[in-house]
Amino acid sequence: MAKIVVIGDVGGCADQLAEAIEPIVEDPAALVIQVGDLIDRGPDSSGVLALVRRRFDAGTDSWIQLIGNHEAQYLGGGRFWPHQLASNDAQLLQTWWMKEWLRVAAAVRTADGEELLVTHAGLSVDAWRDLGAPVTASTAADLLNTRPEQLLWNDRGPLWAEAGPDVYQSWMYAREPVPFGQVHGHSTIVSYRRETWLCGERIRQRATVDWTARHTITRIGGCRFIGIDPKHGNTGAPTWSPLILHDAVLLT
């Protein structure tokens, strides 16, 4: 068992990432999963990639890096962000992708025995069905890590789905039981800056918010859907925290 630290979207905010990893760098029991969107929007995408590169240089066993839709622009997905990375940073992402140091998904089991699929944006019911309706988070992660291109680059796939309308609502109305919980970044059902809700009443009734950590938990079918995108914006969130799972197990 380990302490698994799941870090939400960074979005070019190197100082925020450095602050998040400082207390865990020297912790031999800590394993980091970062959910993607390392780059763009914030002031220092190059600095963010340099921090991750140092973690990889120290060994890839303690850092699992997922891709988000922003990294996907340089890995085969369509371009949408108006500002491009420096060529050496783009090449770095492509090298990590070819070495399989970048993943699409991970799966963990908590101390309570709960299985959680970790992706950038979340897995909707339709995307789950396209995978063959896997019954465990670890099987879903393994299938996603084969990089099914038609699903990855889909605008409602695990790199692009919106939490409320695409992921949560699809599971709330699904005919199948919810097979496992999920952890995701990319979007959120609240505005942290305004402390207001951005979702409908049915989701709101099932959700709780930690406004300081910038996490949401929505309970659907007995499972937790945990949103951890802190919405750093251009300058970084004033307060936020990674999601820490104590005594957890990495399944894949």
Image (spheres, grey):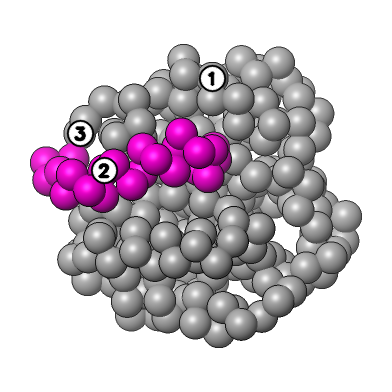
Asked if 111 appears above or below 239 in the picture, the reply is above
Magenta-colored stretch includes residue 87: yes
Image coordinates for residue 182, horizontal then vertical, percent: 65, 46
Image coordinates for residue 118, horizontal then vertical, percent: 62, 46
Q: Is residue 112 left or right of residue 149?
A: right
For the N terminus, the quadrant is bottom right
Q: Amino acid at mark 2?
A: Ala
| Tag 1 residue | 148
| Tag 2 residue | 90
Residue drawn at x 28%, y 66% as measured from the top left: 47
Most foreground residue, 105 or 228: 105
Compare marks 2 and 1 and give the one earlier in the sequence. 2
Instruction: Judge depth for marks 1 and 3 and give the one in front.
Output: 1
Spatial separation of the CA atoms under disc 2 and disc 1: 22 Å
Spatial separation of the CA atoms under disc 1 and disc 3: 21 Å
Image coordinates for residue 38, horizontal then vertical, percent: 36, 55
Q: Amino acid at mark 3?
A: Phe
Residue drawn at x 81%, y 29% as measured from the top left: 135
Magenta-colored stretch includes residue 129: no
Q: Is residue 232 left or right of residue 109?
A: left
Image coordinates for residue 185, horizontal then vertical, percent: 47, 51
State whether residue 37 appears in this view. Answer: yes
| Tag 3 residue | 80
SS class of the residue under badge 2? helix
Residue drawn at x 87%, y 61% as measured from the top left: 112
Compare marks 1 and 3 and give the one earlier in the sequence. 3
Compare marks 2 and 3 and give the one earlier in the sequence. 3
State whether residue 165 appears in this view. Answer: no
Range drawn in magenta: 81-104
SS class of the residue under badge 3? loop
SS class of the residue under badge 1? loop
